[in-house]
Every structure is written in structure tokens, then in C-alpha cells.
């Protein structure tokens, strides 16, 4: 199945994604968000500081993906 992925911030370099475009990724059926992320060998410390959206909704790593889903990865912003 094909998943579209877009990333912002420092994860773009791991996924080789242009900020303004989605990248189409082929993954096996019934894959979870974790399985998609694991394909890119992203260190866990990076993952912990990002929010994951699937089709515009917050997602957990164990959530299953479906063909045509859009995954957006956004860094957590902090400050004061």
C-alpha cells in the first residue's frame, strides 16, 4: 500500500523529504505507524520530540495505517 509522508524540522533529513511536498512510501498492508517510522532508522530520541498526525488526527505509534493515508510529522515546539 502507498502512504504519503510529510515532515517538518530535523526529521526531513532522515526521510529525505522536501518541506512543501509529500513523499509516497510503499509499505506492507496492515503496517503500523511505528513500522513506517522504523523504515527510516530514526533514533528514538528524535521520535519522542515529534507529533504524528494521520489524515489530520493525532496518532499513536501502534495505530494501523491504510492505503492512501497521509502522515505528517511535526516537531514539538516549546518556549516561554
Image (cartoon, rainbow, N blue to C red):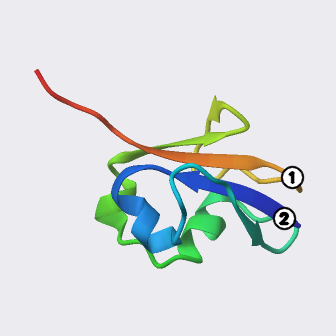
Q: Residue furthest left?
A: 80
Nearest the viewer among 61 and 71 is 71
Q: Residues within 10 Å of mark 2 (few under 14, many from 20)?
A: some
For residue 50, side relative to residue 23 (left or right)? left
Which residue has dot 1 on it?
A: 68
Which residue has dot 2 on it?
A: 2
Q: Residue at x 73, y 56 (%)?
A: 4
Q: Residue furthest top?
A: 80
Nearest the viewer among 36 and 74 is 74
Q: Residues within 10 Å of mark 1 (few under 14, many from 20)?
A: few
Whole-number angstrom distance, CA of label 2 to CA of label 1: 6 Å
Assign a secondary structure to mark 1: loop
Assign a secondary structure to mark 2: strand
Q: Residue at x 86, y 52 (%)?
A: 68
Q: Residue at x 63, y 53 (%)?
A: 21
The tag on residue 32 is none
* Horizontal and vertical percent position of residue 73: 51, 48
* Horizontal and vertical percent position of residue 65: 78, 54
Q: Relative to residue 53, is residue 11 depicted above or below?
A: below
Quadrant containing the N terminus is bottom right
Residue contact between numbered discs 2 and 1, judged by CB atoms under 8 Å: yes
| Number of marks drawn | 2
For residue 73, side relative to residue 53 (left or right)? left
Nearest the viewer among 8 and 49 is 8
Q: Relative to residue 3, is residue 25 depicted above or below?
A: below
Say whether disc 2 or disc 1 marks the residue closer to the N-terminus: 2
* Horizontal and vertical percent position of residue 75: 37, 44
Q: Residue at x 80, y 73 (%)?
A: 26
Amino acid at each position: 500500500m502507498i502512504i504519503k509522508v510529510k515532515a517538518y524540522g530535523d526529521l526531513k533529513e532522515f526521510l529525505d523529504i522536501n518541506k512543501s511536498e509529500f513523499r509516497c512510501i510503499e509499505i506492507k498492508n496492515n503496517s503500523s505507524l511505528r513500522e513506517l517510522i522504523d523504515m527510516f532508522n530514526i533514533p528514538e530520541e528524535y521520535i519522542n520530540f515529534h507529533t504524528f498526525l494521520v489524515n489530520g488526527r493525532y496518532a499513536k505509534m501502534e495505530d494501523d495505517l491504510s492505503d492512501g493515508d497521509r502522515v505528517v510529522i511535526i516537531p514539538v515546539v516549546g518556549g516561554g
